[in-house]
Amino acid sequence: MEKIQDFKEYLKIPRKTVILTHFKPDADALGSSLGLAHYLKKKGHPTLVITPSDYPDFIAWMPGNKDVMIHQREKFEKSAKLISQAELIFCLDFSCLSRINDLGEMVRKSSAKKVLIDHHLEPEHFADFEQWDDTAASTAELVFKLIADLGDKNLIDADIADCLYAGLMTDTGSFRHSNTSGQVFQIASELVEHGADPYKVSKLIYDTNTLERLRLMGYVLSEKLQVLPEYRTAYIVLSAEELKRFGSQTGDTEGLVNYGLSVKGVKLSVLISDRRENIKLSLRSLGNFSVNEMARAHFDGGGHRNAAGGQTTLTLEQTVKKFLDILPLYKDQLLND
Ligand code: 5GP
Ligand code: MN
């Protein structure tokens, strides 16, 4: 099933379908999954979206949200059964099966046809059909293209368009990051023609903060943001106690790392936070400096050149030390333009 024509043929009869996306899904992960789910359901395929974990409230408005199955909240056997019974499995917005934790092995073992739709670097090749493009700004964009390639653009309604628009908007940082191509604007425009409401989507995502989240942001900016001019690096460290003090919920720290990168002269920004189960790192960079490489080499992670994530099982202090200790290895790259 390497070609779109074969895939189209395969979809001619209803297929029991499961759509999976990565741990702690963001707006692109959930938006591309729900956008695709609406489309497949319209085509007559029984479709279920499963996420490995919960996700922020500011994306839970998406049409179809109430039907999403959150694996962490269910019995292991329930997901295992659904995945083993699926005929078709879509993997959206992640490039290696370890990003979906214990669901990864279930997918590997399943005899279903597997489709990868993703824009992260260095994908693991486990799928029968790949819609993979690391130059795409978002997975939502690739779902749009898949629907277009299948000749079904006319099926894109307001629900599908809002979900896909949310992914496109957030993965380009509201059309500001270096991945904001002409094609991004073209697809955004087509989504609006099909009923996406940019005002509604941006209000729901960006203007639904809790007071605690804003207070956390204020605290981070005034007390926690560190800058190391000699490495053109900014970093923020948040302990479990600090996160608890501000009543932090899933998604509350999203976007904080970008403030570091907005400091004049800074090329690398890192947020290190203690999630209790592990230490999570969020990395952002400008230009040619690859945080994907840094996250892969030192923090069991990956992502894109300018936005990546990772984790450690060290303590928070050990993780910060490790990060500061590796900076000299990157000094030349960080100081070169
Ligand atoms: P964030 O910092 O917002 O969590 O993630 C930035 C980018 O890196 C996203 O595209 C996300 O999918 C990816 N990413 C985050 N954490 C990990 C990780 O642990 N492993 C890999 N491979 N990618 C990650
Ligand atoms: Mn994405």
Image (cartoon, rainbow, N blue to C red):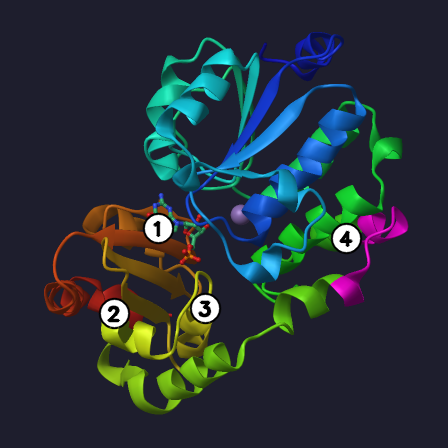
- The relative height of residue 317 versus residue 294 in the rendered view (above or below) is below
**Residue labelled 1 has its Cβ within 8 Å of some atom of ligand 1:** yes
Sort mark 2 into few (<14), some (14-19) or many (20+) by Cα contacts within 10 Å.
some
User: What kind of element bears circle 1?
Assistant: helix
Please tell me which residue is depicted at 39% across the width and 81% down the height of the picture: 265
Q: Amino acid at mark 1?
A: Asn
User: What kind of element bears circle 2?
Assistant: helix
First in sequence: mark 1 vs mark 2: 2
Q: Nearer the viewer, residue 123 or 158?
A: 158
First in sequence: mark 1 vs mark 4: 4
The residue carrying mark 3 is 252
Q: Nearer the viewer, residue 229 or 295?
A: 295
- The relative height of residue 73 versus residue 323 in the rendered view (above or below) is above
Q: Position of residue 323 (x, y in %)?
A: 18, 65
Q: Is residue 315 left or right of residue 87?
A: left
Q: Nearer the viewer, residue 128 or 71?
A: 71
Residue 142, image quadrant: top right
Cα separation between marks 4 and 3? 26 Å
- The relative height of residue 93 versus residue 221 in the rendered view (above or below) is above
Q: Amino acid at mark 2?
A: Ala
User: What kind of element bears circle 3?
Assistant: loop
**Which mark is on residue 240?**
2
User: What kind of element bears circle 4?
Assistant: helix
Q: Position of residue 304 (x, y in %)?
A: 43, 50
The residue carrying mark 4 is 188
Report the magenta stretch's main SS.
helix
